[in-house]
Amino acid sequence: MSVLKTSQATGSTGAVLEARGSSRFLHIVNRLPAISTERLTILASLFFSLTSNYLFFSAAVAGRNWAQFDSWLFAGAIFVAITALQSAALLFLLNRWTAKPVLTVLFLVTAAATYYMNKYTVFFDSDMVRNILRTDVKEASELFSLSFCIHMLVFAVLPILLLWKLRLKTTSWYRAIPVRLLYIIGALAVTAGSTMLVYQDFSSLMRNQKEVRYLITPSNYLYSLVRVVVADTAHANTPRVKISEDAKMAATWGQRTKPMLFILVVGETTRAANWGLNGYEHQTTPELSKLDVMNFPHATSCGTNTEVSVPCMFSIYGRRNYDEAKIRGHESLLHIIDHVGVKTIWRDNQAGCKGVCDGLEEQQLGNSKNPALCDGERCLDEIMLENMDGEIHKAKNGNLFIVMHQLGNHGPAYYRRYPASMRTFTPTCDTSDLSKCSREQIVNAYDNGVLYTDHFLAKTIAYLKTQTTYDTAMLYLSDHGESLGEHGIYLHGLPYSIAPKEQTQIPMVMWLSQGFANSFHLNKDCLAKRAANPVSQDNLFHSILGMLQIESKYYDKSLDISAECRS
């Protein structure tokens, strides 16, 4: 009892001291003089430069000799220039009525952005912003952690509390306007002057490392957000350009005796480096290694995130002629296949088809209730094989082209991408906060996810083998790869020009039934040899048209991996 009383007394004393401390802090804050909106803007910009731009400054001054004065001059000049330039931009947005609400949002978003930038080396370009805007709640929830909450408390909540305690000066509009103009002109002049001091080095940095501009925070995500909104608004009510109207089945379709069932599996975040069939030290593809599959060990992606890669791989443009607006503004490969009379279905266990199946049948299976495969939040990828017999029955023995979009190995919660029975490589990282795990644990958890993809693909092939009334085939390729700590980089989404090979090199596997090969006049031995050559997602559009013998003016034989193997 005495211990309890002592604890209570100590707790009471602590509460009193805490209350006095809070009271003293509030007293000090309340005694602060009123501040002008212009000075608040400069202080906010200085805060962002000091707390939110570690990656930018690290990249900008990398490799410099700090024993030389020029290095210090360069670092100081770009710090001042960025602070002044962001101040000028904010001066256009903030006034006595908007300053606190706008800065509140900026503090919150910037703190969240810098957490993931510093933790995973994220660049906030347009592709990354679009990726974030289209991320579902389930995916976003996996990114929360205790360290994230602490970061937000320090770099967002506390500054916001201080912000709302500050008193802003009130000034008549006819005095405020000229003062505001002087501040803007002054900020731009400081920006220009600081830049000119180190112009040669600064221009070289911006010219040779263009991607670093997407590390300047909060300018990076604000600029990218505007670009995304403008682009999406411009195309919101514009119908897709049709590329399917001239497409038709080749005359050889009339010689076939069975309908076709083709399954295209679009993987998620699987990298070639950890693919067992490519010779990886962990055997992550034990089931596929026992099957008659063609492995493509030198395959590359169109992008480093789903928002780029999925639309790109189904488009006529691809990486070689990449044009985001045209890719999103045109019909996809799937529209051509559906147009010629092949029933086309998109089955999804991820975040949708990214526009490539617009107007076609799309089935969202991630919210299924199968207790054996779903935990109430996510479903394992085998859910996409559920009720396949029903889909085939609805097709009434017609030709079917089915796309399965995996949840795959989407990070950072790798441990949730496979069932307990697949926990082969140990120890594993059993949290989405990768900073709490060793690299070995992270890689093991990731490899178990790859092992489950191997199982899912083998099970898909086994299912196709049972469909004896169809000529069946399967093609698998991942949308992009993943960084697992190489060079301090995790996850994916870096700008393609600087992305490491771990994010762009992907696995690709093909399986054909003998009936399919015979009906479409494909030489499997020839394809197996062709698989040793480099391929990319640019080949998908033309190879599918070629393999299925669909004629289109957009078909390019030089990009068809099956062209040389078709009689």
Image (cartoon, grey):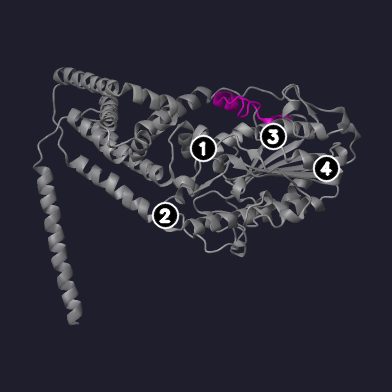
| 10 Å crowding of disc 4: few (<14), some (14-19), many (20+) | few
- What distance separates the C-alpha of mark 4 from that of mark 1? 34 Å
**Quick check: marks 2 and 4 in contact, CB under 8 Å?**
no
- What distance separates the C-alpha of mark 2 from that of mark 1? 21 Å
Residue appearing at x 45%, y 32% in the figure: 125
Looking at the figure, which quarter contains the N terminus? bottom left
> What residue is disc 3 on?
540
Does residue 138 appear left or right of residue 61 in this picture?
right
- Was residue 328 drawn as part of the magenta stretch in this picture? yes
Q: How many marks?
A: 4
**Quick check: marks 2 and 1 in contact, CB under 8 Å?**
no
- What distance separates the C-alpha of mark 2 from that of mark 4? 46 Å
Q: Position of residue 473 (x, y in %)?
A: 78, 44
Q: Quadrant of residue 36?
A: top left
Does residue 34 appear left or right of residue 487 in this picture?
left
**Mark 2: amino acid:** Ser
> What residue is disc 2 on?
435
Looking at the figure, which quarter contains the C terminus? top right
Please name which of the two marks, 2 or 3, marks the residue nearer to the observer: 2
**Which disc number belongs to residue 499?**
1
The stretch of residues the image draws in magenta is: 316-337
SS at mark 2 in the image: helix
**Which disc number belongs to residue 63?**
none
- Looking at the image, tell me whether mark 2 or mark 4 is earlier in sequence order: 2
SS at mark 4 in the image: helix
